[in-house]
Structures are given as structure tokens and as C-alpha cells.
Image (cartoon, helix red, strand yellow):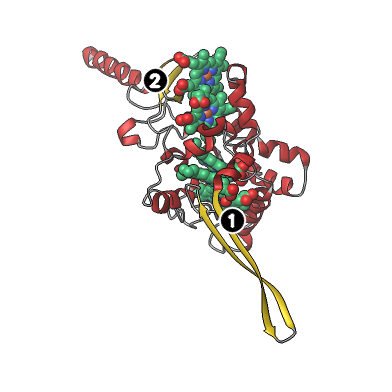
Amino acid sequence: MREVWYLRFVLFFILSLFLVCPVWAKEPVKKAKTVDELIKMFDSSSCKQCHPKEYEEWSKSIHAKSLIGTPRTLGSMAGTIESLWKEFPHSGVKSVQDITADHLMFCMKCHAPQVKYAEPSAARELAELILKAAQQDEAAWKKVEQVNINCLICHQEVAIVHKWLDGEVDRKAVYGKKEGAHMDAKYKTLKKSPIMGQAVFCGQCHGTGPNFEFPQPSQCTTTYGSYLHAYIPSGGAKTCQDCHMREDGIGHLMPAYRDKRMIKKALDYSVEATGYYYLHKPGDLRPTARIVVKMKGKAGHRMPDG
Ligand code: HEC
Ligand code: HEC
Ligand code: HEC
Ligand code: HEC
Ligand code: HEC
């Protein structure tokens, strides 16, 4: 009897070891109960100290306010949240109180992918803040602005696309183009993201077409689709990073047509004009011109996008 008890104890001890320290299980991301917790989970403020150039450029980019935009995005986000109860009878949302992260992902997938780690309480709070910010509430605006596409979203959260090949993201690492030690107090390793320098990295959020994976599919931008189906087949060889980061030292500002350097790169055009007089009827000589405009888009996708 005593031995059986002893064996049971040993077995229990061994099993509990696995329960306490799951050797194989990847550390799950703890979900955020409040918007402040969500912001803290992806806090990138430590990066500023050692990467001031990247930080400065990024903070002026539209990625740094990806729920606010120009600020057309904010209005459209607020409208979409209201449409959950105003336009979609089967969304399960009767008021803002019913909102969970699942109701927001058809926008947040690209505008703030970290929202998938929001508990219902945090998702509801974010929805309420977006509605208030759209009504010009300054405090709400400032908080919504902090839920954005920052250093850790790109250099960790979305740094790996092919997870069966490359594995899950390591939450203690920062992903770049090489492996090694990293000086950040929290993210002490540098890992290589195989896609960081490729178009597919940006393509994750820059759209191929409708997002059919959601119960209510959405379609926003389709730049990556256009890049794949028009630019590449017609001989284009550059990546998004070439045109939007590397050339002209543009870096993390990653601008589009709001930047003069991008406008200059957008089009090849020529104008030929010949002026002459056209005798419509006797006594009615009209000044006329023949103008030939040739325009060729040089961007890596259609313009404008939408
Ligand atoms: C205490 C200084 C320090 C802090 C803080 C820091 N870094 Fe770094 N980081 C470095 C140094 C130094 C390197 C260059 C390492 C090398 O070249 O071996 C580096 C390299 C990198 C690279 C790789 C660049 C490449 O060539 O691929 C990335 C990406 C990066 N850091 C992102 C971040 C992010 C994101 C944060 C904030 C979470 C951060 N760093 C915080 C010092 C720091
Ligand atoms: C996690 C998703 C995500 C990733 C990854 C991403 N973007 Fe974006 N990007 C966005 C969103 C969302 C916006 C639009 C924000 C808005 O207007 O509200 C945007 C906007 C832009 C714009 C418009 C800027 C402007 O000033 O009008 C450019 C250009 C751009 N991204 C380039 C890139 C490039 C190049 C990459 C890859 C190196 C990239 N993005 C990676 C989500 C992403
Ligand atoms: C597949 C990723 C993706 C999804 C899903 C997505 N967006 Fe976007 N959205 C983007 C990117 C990237 C841009 C910037 C593209 C550009 O400037 O061409 C953008 C741009 C916008 C703009 C234009 C901003 C401006 O100033 O012109 C609005 C508004 C917008 N999104 C709202 C939404 C809403 C609302 C939803 C959900 C119904 C949504 N988006 C879903 C990726 C996405
Ligand atoms: C929208 C995605 C995105 C965001 C946000 C972003 N990065 Fe990057 N970062 C990239 C990409 C892509 C590259 C690789 C560029 C290339 O291949 O030329 C890169 C490169 C780097 C490098 C290597 C040096 C270089 O310029 O090639 C460092 C360091 C870095 N990022 C730090 C940061 C820091 C710090 C932040 C936040 C302030 C940040 N990044 C935000 C996408 C991003
Ligand atoms: C050959 C160079 C080139 C490549 C490759 C390229 N772009 Fe662009 N892109 C441009 C130029 C130039 C503009 C500015 C066009 C303008 O003035 O409207 C632009 C505009 C944009 C805009 C703003 C579009 C709008 O109408 O709001 C986004 C977003 C964007 N690019 C993202 C990307 C992404 C993501 C990729 C890769 C899938 C990419 N670009 C590849 C040159 C390029």
C-alpha cells in the first residue's frame, strides 16, 4: 500500500513539473484587460534612446497613428463601429457594450493587429474611445493614437509570416536582418526575420483584395495585390522597401504622395502642344490647340489606391 502511495506521489510530482514548466508549449501572449495594458504590452519607447533616427522618422509617419490617419481613418473607424448595431443585424452587437476584439478585427487586422490580444473589456474600451475621439475628445484621441503600428509591431508581431517554416515569434526578441545579442533591457536578442526586406512583409497589411476570412469580409487597400498582379508581371523588380524606405534615404517615414520625393518618382510624363487657328466659318477664326499628354505610372502599383 505504502509503495503504491509513494509511486503515486512520484508520478504526481513528475506530472506537476510538466504543468508548472511546460517544456514544449510556447509562452502564450497574455491578454490585455484595458487599453492601457494593451499599449504597455507593445511599448516601444525604449527603442528611442538607441535608434533616435528610426524613432524620429517613424513618429512622423502615418504608421504612428494608424487608427487616426489623416484623420480620415478615425471617422471611418467610428462609423464602422456604429455600423455593427446600425447596419449589421446579425453581428451580435446591440450597443457598444457587446463589442469584443472579434468585432473589430476586420479593420484592426492591419490598422492595429495587437487588438487581437484585447480582452472584451479592452476591446469595448477601445471602441468607446474611438467614438469619443471622433467627437473631438482630446484625451480619447491621444489614447487611441497610442494604439498604432510601432517598432514592436513590425519588428516582432508581424516579423514572421511563414510560421510552419520559420516557427512562432519569440516574444523576447526583436527581429531584423541578423542574429545576435541586442542591448535593449527587455528584448535582449536579435533574430533574423526572413521577410523584413521583402514586399510580402508590407503585403501582410497592404492588401491583396477582400479579407474573406472574416464573418463580415472587409476590403480596404489592395496595393500588394496590384504590385503582385500588375507591377511584377510587367517587369517591375523593386520592392516596397526600395521605393518607400531605401531610395533617397527615406527610411521609416515610409511616405506616399505627401512627400515631394515620392511625387517626383510617381510619373513619367511628356506634353506636346501645337497651337493653330481653325476657321470654323467665314469670319469665325478660332484659336485651337492640339495637346498630346503621355503619362506612365512609375509606382509599384496602381495610383491612387483604394
Ligand atoms: C541600449 C540600446 C538599444 C536599445 C534600447 C534598443 N536597441 Fe536595437 N540595436 C541596438 C544596437 C547597438 C544594435 C546593433 C546590433 C548589431 O549590429 O549587432 C541594434 C540593432 C537593432 C535591430 C537590427 C538592425 C539590423 O541590422 O537588422 C533592430 C531591428 C532593432 N535594434 C530594433 C530595436 C527595437 C524595436 C527596440 C525597442 C524595443 C530597440 N532596438 C532598442 C541598440 C539598442
Ligand atoms: C501591421 C500592418 C502594416 C505593415 C506591416 C505595413 N503597413 Fe504601411 N500602413 C498600414 C496602415 C494601416 C496604413 C494606413 C494608416 C491610415 O492612413 O490610417 C499604412 C500606410 C502606409 C503608407 C501611406 C503613408 C502616407 O503617408 O500616406 C505607406 C507608403 C506605407 N504604409 C508603406 C508601407 C511599407 C513600405 C511597408 C513595409 C516596409 C508597410 N507599409 C508595412 C499598415 C501596415
Ligand atoms: C488588409 C488590411 C486592411 C484592412 C483589413 C483594413 N484596412 Fe484600412 N487601410 C489599410 C492600409 C494599408 C491603408 C493605407 C493605404 C493607402 O494609403 O493606400 C488603409 C487606409 C484606410 C483609410 C484611408 C485613410 C486616408 O486618409 O485616406 C481608411 C478610412 C481606412 N483604411 C479604414 C478602414 C476601416 C474602417 C477598416 C475596416 C472596415 C479597414 N480600413 C480595414 C489596410 C487595411
Ligand atoms: C511598418 C513597419 C516598421 C515599423 C513600424 C518600424 N520598422 Fe524598423 N524596419 C522595417 C523594415 C521593413 C526594415 C528593413 C529595411 C530594409 O530592408 O531596407 C527596418 C529596419 C530597421 C532597422 C535596421 C536599420 C535600417 O534602417 O535598415 C532598425 C534599427 C529599425 N528598423 C528600428 C526600428 C525602430 C526603433 C522602430 C520604431 C521607432 C521601427 N524600426 C519601426 C519596418 C518597420
Ligand atoms: C517602383 C517604386 C514603388 C514600389 C515598388 C512600391 N511603391 Fe508604393 N508608391 C510609389 C510612389 C512613387 C507612390 C506615390 C504616388 C503618388 O504620388 O500618388 C506610392 C504610393 C504608395 C501608397 C499610397 C497610395 C495611395 O493612393 O494612397 C502606398 C500605401 C504604397 N505606395 C505602398 C506600397 C507597398 C505596400 C508596396 C509594396 C507592395 C509599394 N508601395 C511598392 C512607389 C512604389
The location of residue 82, given as percent across then percent down, is 65, 56
From where the camera sits, is residue 31 visible?
no
**Disc 1 marks which residue?**
93
Is 114 placed above or below 155 here? below
| Circle 2 Cα neighbour tier, 10 Å, few/some/many (<14 / 14–19 / ≥20) | few
Is 57 placed above or below 205 here? above
Q: What residue appears at the point 72 percent right and 79 percent down from the top-left corner?
A: 285
The location of residue 280, given as percent across then percent down, is 68, 83
**Disc 2 marks which residue?**
20
Disc 1, SS: loop
| Quadrant for the C terminus in the image | bottom right
Q: Quadrant of residue 185?
A: top right
Answer left or right for 43 relative to 200. right
Q: Quadrant of residue 42?
A: top right
Q: Looking at numbered disc 1 in the image, what kind of residue is underneath it?
A: Val
The location of residue 270, given as percent across then percent down, is 56, 55
Nearest the viewer among 303 and 32 is: 303
Nearest the viewer among 56 and 109 is: 56
Answer yes or no: do the residues labelled 2 and 1 have beta carbons within 8 Å? no
Mark 1 within 8 Å of ligand 3, using the beta carbon: no
Q: What residue appears at the point 51 percent right and 52 percent down from the top-left corner?
A: 297
| Circle 1 Cα neighbour tier, 10 Å, few/some/many (<14 / 14–19 / ≥20) | some
The location of residue 17, given as percent across then percent down, is 34, 18
Mark closer to the chain start, 2 or 1: 2
Is 161 placed above or below 263 here? above
Residue mark closest to the camera, 2 vs 1: 1
Q: Looking at numbered disc 2 in the image, what kind of residue is underneath it?
A: Val
From where the camera sits, is residue 27 visible?
yes
Mark 2 within 8 Å of ligand 1, using the beta carbon: no
Q: What residue appears at the point 61 percent right and 23 percent down from the top-left corner?
A: 53
Q: Report the number of discs.
A: 2
Nearest the viewer among 193 and 75 is: 193
